[in-house]
Amino acid sequence: QVLLVESGGGLVQAGGSLRLSCVDSGRIFSSYAMNWFRQAPGKEREFVAAISRSGGSTYYGDSVKGRFTISRDNAKNTVYLQMNSLKPEDTAVYYCSAGNLGSGTYWGQGVQVTVSS
């Protein structure tokens, strides 16, 4: 069973940073690639970043390349998203998901990130 819980969201000024965390309370975290997606009001869900099971490979959406970093700690069943140089257009609900690279089978409940200008 996979149960994903995100944390670390909040309100930040443009140019600031946040780090999101997603903990899997299941027992097979290292069996899944992990992803971050986001969805802004009135927009479709957007791929943000993905990381392979071992953490050796990472992938990013074009809009966050060079600003966001995905990482994972399999010993802690946790995936992270370090977000730097945040922009107002990064405002969205951020979701972590477990599954294949770029697609999720299991989803968290989401965490709000708001970037003020």
Image (cartoon, rainbow, N blue to C red):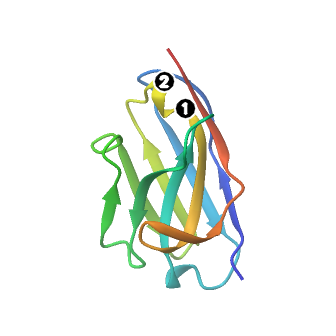
Q: Position of residue 35 (x, y in %)?
A: 49, 63
| Residue pictured at 48% horizontal, 24% vertical | 88
Q: Is 66 drawn above or below residue 69 in the view shown?
A: above
Q: Which mark is residue 88?
A: 2
Q: Position of residue 116 (x, y in %)?
A: 55, 18
Which residue of the protein is positioned furthest toward the left in this rendering?
66
Q: Is 1 drawn above or below residue 58 in the view shown?
A: below
> Which residue is more in the foreground, 16 or 102?
102
Residue carrying label 1: 91
Q: Position of residue 51 (x, y in %)?
A: 40, 67
| Residue pictured at 62% horizontal, 40% vertical | 9
| Residue pictured at 72% horizontal, 55% vertical | 109
Q: Position of residue 31 (x, y in %)?
A: 51, 85
Q: Secondary structure at mark 1?
A: loop
Q: Amino acid at mark 2?
A: Pro
| Residue pictured at 37% horizontal, 72% vertical | 55
Q: Quadrant of the N terminus?
A: bottom right
Q: Secondary structure at mark 2?
A: helix
Q: Quadrant of residue 25?
A: bottom right
Q: Report the Cα–Cα distance between label 2 and label 1.
A: 6 Å
Q: Is 73 drawn above or below residue 94 in the view shown?
A: below
Pointer 2 with pointer 1, Cβ within 8 A: yes
> Which residue is more in the foreground, 43 or 88?
43
Relative to 114, 82 lies left or right: left
